[in-house]
Image (cartoon, rainbow, N blue to C red):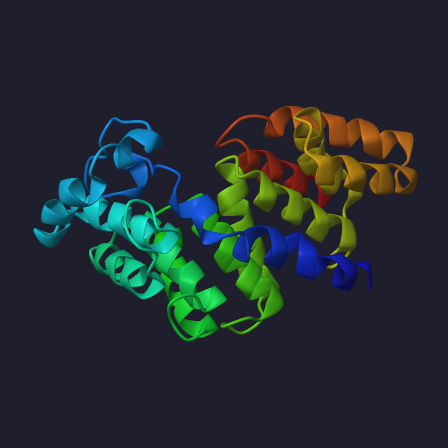
Amino acid sequence: MQWAKWVKWGVVGTMLVTPLWAQASEKPTAKHSAVPIPEAKTEDLYAGNSLNRWMPKAERGDIFAQYVLGHMYCVGQGVPKDMVKGLSWYQRAADQGFAPGQLALGTMYYNGEGVKQDYTVAAKWFRLAAERGYDRAQSNLAAMYMNGTGVPQDYTLAIKWFRAAANQGYATAQYTLSRMYSDGTGMSKPDMVAAYGLLRPLVEKGNAAAVTAMKELLPKMNPDQIKQGQELAERIRGKNRLNKALDAYEKIALR
């Protein structure tokens, strides 16, 4: 099955094994947090004596400060690199419900960084962040359901969470969802129109994986399917439009 050839790279390789620091160093947004996020560029967070700046706040329970300290220790930013200490600060932020901290903690458990590898615990933290609406966590949780890693394999839940992340504009989830449609994974049969509709917006943005996938997809489609795919792609473009567009398309396709 074609799916088995690309799943390890296409899902795990690009979502769960992406270095944690590429995720954790990005400044989270307020919508993923129960607390306000300081208005500052990421590089400004580590200006000057960062440890003296953030440690007092973190010890007083400031969630964002705990998250920043977790990143500092994990990458050795202004402090000696210490994955265990980094994990402990991420843990404090995660325990208070801070979704970026939950995502970072889940990734550390998934990769076995600073802690014994534990896919079940990783899935737990991804789920908590996913339920708060964090697109990367939703995509990671979907990948775990698709592969049966840390959770029972469940394609229906994988599709649900990939759609949730893709609906927010997360390209990796949208690409993977397209591949699921093209291969018919978790579905009664492949759907090239839906696969095309999901891929095209990514191709237009120059996504290399999507460009390659589109080259594989087009020879399998007839002109009418391509036209339908183009129409679906037009409805999908932009955030928070994907689910509505797919639902409407699938209702028509099932007639």
Can residue 186 be seen here? The reply is no
What residue is at 40 percent from the left and 52 percent from the top? 130
From the top left corner, tell me how far across and down residue 192 is, in percent. Answer: 79, 43
The N terminus is located in which quarter?
A: bottom right
Q: Is residue 19 rendered to the left or right of residue 134?
A: right
Residue found at the far front of this picture: 80
Tell me where residue 116 sits by quadrant.
bottom left
Q: Is residue 68 above or below residue 117?
A: above
Tell me where residue 117 sits by quadrant.
bottom left
Q: Which of 45 and 143 is in front in this view?
A: 45
What residue is at 55 percent from the left and 52 percent from the top? 15
Q: Is residue 33 rendered to the left or right of residue 15?
A: left
Q: Which of 95 and 87 is in front in this view?
A: 87
The C terminus is located in which quarter?
A: top right
Q: In this view, does 202 lie above or below 14?
A: above
Q: Is residue 92 above or below residue 55?
A: below
Q: Is residue 8 rendered to the left or right of residue 46?
A: right
Q: Which of 84 and 7 is in front in this view?
A: 84
What residue is at 34 percent from the left and 56 percent from the top? 81
Can residue 204 be seen here? The reply is yes
From the top left corner, tell me how far across and down residue 140 is, in percent. Answer: 50, 55
Tell me where residue 26 sits by quadrant.
top left
From the top left corner, tell me how far across and down residue 103 is, in percent. Answer: 38, 54
